[in-house]
Amino acid sequence: MKKLKNCVRGLTLTAIASSVLAALPAWAVEPFMLKDIRVEGLQRVEPGTVFASLPFRIGDTYSDDKGTAAIRALFGLGLFNDVRLQVNDDVLVVIVEERPTVADVSFSGVREFDKDALLASLRDVGLAEGRPFDKALADRAEQELKRQYINRSMYTTQVVTTVTPIDRNRVNLNFSVSEGDVAKIHEIRVVGNKAFAESTLRNLFDLDTGGWLSWYTKSDRYERSKLNADLESLRSYYLQRGYLDFKIDSTQVAISPDKEKMSVTINITEGERFVVSEVKLEGQYFGKEEDFKSLVEIEVGQAYNAEEVSRTIKNFTDFFGSFGYAFARVEAVPTIDRATNQVSFSLQAQPARRVYVRRINIEGNNRTRDEVIRREFRQLESSWYDSDRIRLSRDRVDRLGFFTEVSIGTEPVPGSNDQVDLTVTVVERPTGNLAIGAGYSQADKLSLIANINVENVFGTGNYVALDLNTSDYSRQFVLSTTDPYFTKDGVSRTFDAYYKTQQPYDAQGGDYTITTKGLGVKFGVPFTERDTVYFGIGGEKVEIEEGNELPEAYLGQDGTYIPATVGWTRDERDSALVPTTGRMQRFNTELGIGGDRRYAKLSYQFQQYIPLNKQYTLAFNTELGAGKGLGGDPFPVLRNFTGGGLGSVRGFDQGTLGPKSAVVGSTTGETVSIGGARKLVLNAEFIAPFPGAGNDRTLRWFGFVDAGNIYGEDESIDMSQLRSSVGFGISWISPIGPLRFAYAHPVRKFDGDKIQKFQFQIGTSF
């Protein structure tokens, strides 16, 4: 009997036999106490991984059930092709055969996708370098690659996987892809429409049957996500025009036998058009019913509009939030009278409970210090929740210009019914720029550039700039520093030191120079949340070295200037980088209080951004300027306003609008632009996201209309002398700075104007 027992212990237990073990009692092992456990066959897997998965330890009693459980646990790791157990003299030997490890994943024949994107998709199904490999995993990887191509309407794509074994039980994988042709949308049908033409409804869709830009927009490629978005646009279109019972019955997508053409058919039921008969308030409004009624955007007597209902609900919840009710529930309950096609709404409010903000958390600021963000917050911890202050805080953080995205989420505090936490999530953008090299622009031609420009030094929110520029027309050395919180109350301080030499842009071949050396200091005092008043003083020394093509107006303009400045800014925009709504006003006064020149210079700028929807924005810009000499002196020519080019009236050469001066010693009557003491510039832009920009909200295109001119000190602003242009352009907050390209066609021009239709700039918004 004893010999039989030892013989049975020497038998091998295999992984596949876990079920067989239960069916063959002749192989059964009598329970015994384990003296030792050994593992054989490991190459890359750590022994500790195996031991941790076993349901027993040395000294435990071993049984068939525990052996079966051990095999199942080891297979469950997904690391082994085979697992066997052997028992010899109370010692358990675990014999494993490891699955190969993926050493490299490569692709051939891939043109449609970036290979990193495909690697990421394969990683989601478990295939990646360093992970175990088996045939089932390769099959899943093939199906995932085909799915990615199907999402791009490439239904004929074929994928062949080649597995190449290499040393140390590793494999290289190559996916050979035959992409085939793209299946394009051949037809889109809307069936069941009566109130609106089919062509009108199809124009709502991003998907279409192709056009001259389809090679770029790929709008003729079927994607389920795009179709869902188009269906939502269709539904919104009807619901905004009174069709309360509108529904989409079905959507059929058919593909031709050759898998190259697709047709989409959308079946709809419009229903009847309903008119709003009444809007009433129900629930708890804390005696502020009249205030809430003023927020109602649902118009009685007009067609039902789902968007107006949504905006009204948002207005109500925001108003409740402004006095602490963060979780107020507002429902617009309709009562439908189908006999008269009328609908009335009951706005039912349940304010729930008033809550405090326990804590404000900040996420995403890897470089920017928490303090820089927190000091912009007007919603304080341990105070009542106030949606107005939270919205203001978000806008203030966004206007810092350090982040491409700023959002604030509200989360209930577990175990508390009157507290919430706010989570501020930011996405930082590069705020520093180091450049050493050469540059080229239309205004300055070839130049050597060296600059360090950091808007958020060491994450402190401070600004430091050091610029060295050696161009044909403008050479400068500028050092500037700004501390936005020079005092705890938010008073900013800016120091400037500069040395500049320049020539006017249109002085060709001239060898005279204007040298300006200066120092200045400016303080910004916040008077309200959105209003800042600036005070500053500086000193300049201007020297003019006469030479060829020197304008006569520049004679006698050298000397000492001591300007004092007083300015005011009110910024109500939602963002400093890419504003879509709000208003910005800026007024500045510069007074020559000392030195060789007495003068006054006033300027005013007004910007208004009007959102048409989430994507499109109208922007308006107005700039006015006036200068006057004091004490009987004329206004200094070197303080003149200039116009033309980007930032002014596009389509006209940079700085060439306005009065001109004769050139010293010219016998041909040559004149050059010198600007003027009065300025009027008007700009209007239609702004939209650039096709294919994805989540980059800083890349946009725009169409524009510009008008403006520069006038002399003794001239009145004559509207008949305005220059104007129309055009389009692209703006982008790129890693190297704000880029702006514009093509303009002058609509109103006069003899002698210098035209420049294509212009580009790294700099300002308008």
Image (cartoon, rainbow, N blue to C red):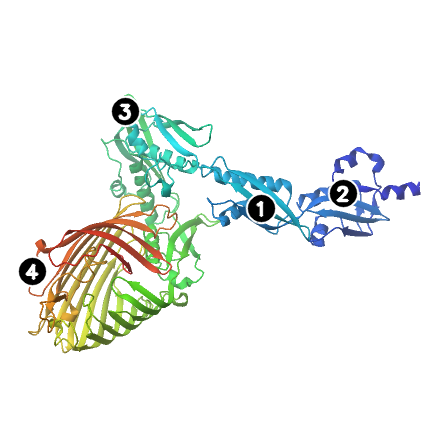
Disc 4 from disc 1: Cα separation: 75 Å
Q: Is residue 324 visible?
A: yes
Tag of residue 256? none
Mark with earlier residue (2, 3): 2
Residue at 15 percent across and 62 percent down: it is 625
Tag of residue 341? 3
Q: Relative to 187, does residue 533 appear above or below in the rendering? A: below
Q: Under tag 3, what secondary structure?
A: loop
Mark with earlier residue (3, 1): 1
Disc 1 from disc 2: Cα separation: 41 Å
Q: Amino acid at mark 4?
A: Ser
Q: Relative to 148, does residue 337 appear above or below in the rendering? A: above
Q: Is residue 578 visible?
A: no
Mark with earlier residue (4, 1): 1
Q: State the image coordinates of residue 752 (x, y, percent, origin top left).
A: 12, 59
Residue at 9 percent across and 58 percent down: it is 717
> CB under 8 Å between callouts 1 and 2?
no
Mark with earlier residue (4, 3): 3
| Label 2 Cα crowd, 10 Å radius (few <14 / some 14-19 / many 20+) | some
Residue at 38 percent across and 54 percent down: it is 406
Q: Under tag 1, what secondary structure?
A: strand
Residue assigned mark 2: 66
Tag of residue 716? 4
> CB under 8 Å between callouts 2 and 3?
no
Q: Relative to 430, does residue 15 appear above or below in the rendering? A: above
Residue assigned mark 1: 174
Quadrant in the rendering for residue 481: bottom left
Of badges 1 and 2, the one in the foreground is 1
Q: Amino acid at mark 3?
A: Asn
Disc 2 from disc 3: Cα separation: 73 Å
Q: State the image coordinates of residue 453 (x, y, percent, origin top left).
A: 35, 67
